[in-house]
Image: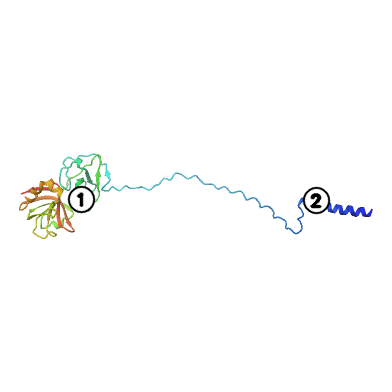
Amino acid sequence: MTVLLICAGIYGILWLLGKAKASGSVPPQGRAAPPPPPAPPPQARTSYRPQARPSRSSAIRFTELGADTPATLSAGSLDGLRDAFTGAILDPALGLFRCTSCQVYYHRESYEVVRSENAGQCVACSSTAIVQVAGKTAPGRNFDPDVVTLADFRQHFGRVVTFEAQVRAVRQSRRGTDYAVFFELKPWRSAFKLVFFRRAVGKVGGPQFVESLEGRTVRVRGLLIDHAQYGPEIIISERSMILAVK
């Protein structure tokens, strides 16, 4: 009887150990218990972001009116107005430019000379605010140039002037297509002169007309410049720039 009780006790212990092993509550001998599974990450916090509004720049942008920017101006009349450079009656077909500072007008060809020979400065006010006119035109004014002489012409460089004096010599360029009409018998660099480039020679009457000026008194209107290489001169580009020949 005692033996049966001992066997029953051993059997009960073995049964309890087997159940514990099956449930995992007792780790196997010699092996560490597996770590608990990681906790699920906390749910991401939702942050409020307002919807971006369309970008509207408050900056004010100015378009600079330059020499090559056409400008449509208010209605006006060109009657009686002349090219500030040459003195010729304005012809819209020749292209018009206008100084927005002093309201004088230029033909396209005149403006090209002003830009290349006078740094783009208006011959009436020295401003560079000269714009191309497109469409309607604005009222303008004529420019009455100063009258200068051999005694004071050096005080008027960069401006259109009226000048009158006797022609002392007419010289032809080395290439034979350009002419210089001298008012002083001095070296080329220091003498005051009129310059007729090839295109202008044909416009004023040809080589015969230019050569006929020697010894005569000529009154001209033009831009007086002091060229770095050729000295003081007025470039003649139109017949209208020669006001009188005596």
Q: Residues within 10 Å of mark 1 (few under 14, many from 20)?
A: many
* Applied colour scheme: rainbow
Closer to the camera in the image, 211 or 114:
211
Inspect this view and state whether residue 108 appears.
yes
Q: Position of residue 57 (x, y in %)?
A: 40, 47
Q: Position of residue 97 (x, y in %)?
A: 22, 45
- Disc number at residue 241? none
How many numbered discs, if any? 2
Residue in view at x 11 percent, y 50 percent: 220
Check the image and report above or below for 37 versus 78.
below
Kindly indicate the quadrant of the structure image that contains residue 148: bottom left
Dot 1: element: helix
Judge from the rendering whether residue 197 lies leftward or rightward of residue 70; answer left or right: left
Label 1 belongs to which residue?
Answer: 114
Q: Position of residue 22 (x, y in %)?
A: 78, 50
Q: Select label 2 or label 1 by which is in front.
A: 2
Label 2 belongs to which residue?
Answer: 19
Closer to the camera in the image, 146 or 200:
200
Which amino acid, by three-letter code, is at mark 1?
Val
Q: Earlier in the sequence, mark 2 or mark 1?
A: 2
Which amino acid, by three-letter code, is at mark 2?
Lys
Q: Position of residue 229 (x, y in %)?
A: 17, 59
Inspect this view and state whether residue 121 appears.
no
Whole-Å distance between the Cαs marked 2 and 1? 112 Å
Residue in view at x 92 percent, y 54 percent: 3
Dot 2: element: helix
